Amino acid sequence: MAKRVLVVEDNELNLKLFCDLLRAHGFEVEPVKDGREAVSRARAFAPDLVVMDIQMPHVTGDEIIRQMKADSQLRAIPIMAVTAYAGRDDEERIRAAGANAYVSKPIGLVRFMEEVRALAPTDAEKPQRDESPAA
């Protein structure tokens, strides 16, 4: 079964890029353009990962991350922050809000997918445990 990724991004081009890239790698994707809808859409979609833009109109990504981490239904879902903010203080603030990973724009596609796979590995990518009986 495909892993599910909620992509919260107000920029149309970035939203399309992230969604197309994730779909090309076998993920099921739910795009959200308005951050005010992110929490309710996350509850309905039940994603395995959230890709969160930080700088959006109406509500910031860090506010949404805090709301998700305070929600018992959503708090365990890993969140990858994607942002043009690139200062050390910005990363610390975003991680303090609850982001599990931080990727700065412009995004390198390989790095983006490495972070996605680290946070939401497919069954084939999960480390295999040795299940042979002990001698």
Image (tube, helix red, strand yellow):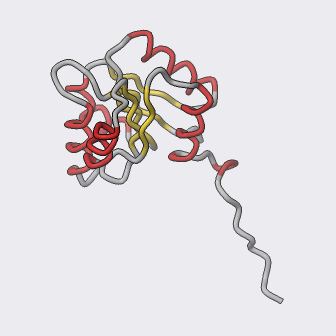
Can you say whether 66 is above or below 36 in the image?
below
Residue at 35% from the left image edge and 21% from the top image edge: 9
**Residue 135 place in picture, x, y as percent:** 83, 89
Residue at 26% from the left image edge and 44% from the top image edge: 68
Q: 84 or 72: nearer the eye?
A: 84
Residue 51 falls in which quadrant of the image?
top left
Q: Residue furthest right?
A: 135
Can you say whether 71 is above or below 135 in the image?
above
Q: Quadrant of the N terminus?
A: top right
Residue at 37% from the left image edge and 30% from the top image edge: 86
Q: Residue furthest bottom?
A: 135
Apparent side of residue 113 relative to residue 65 in the rendered image (left or right):
right
Q: 105 or 74: nearer the eye?
A: 105
Apparent side of residue 23 relative to residue 77 in the rendered image (left or right):
right
How many marks do you count on the picture?
A: 0
Apparent side of residue 85 relative to residue 125 in the rendered image (left or right):
left
**Residue 16 place in picture, x, y as percent:** 47, 14
Can you say whether 13 is above or below 102 in the image?
above
Residue 83 falls in which quadrant of the image?
top left
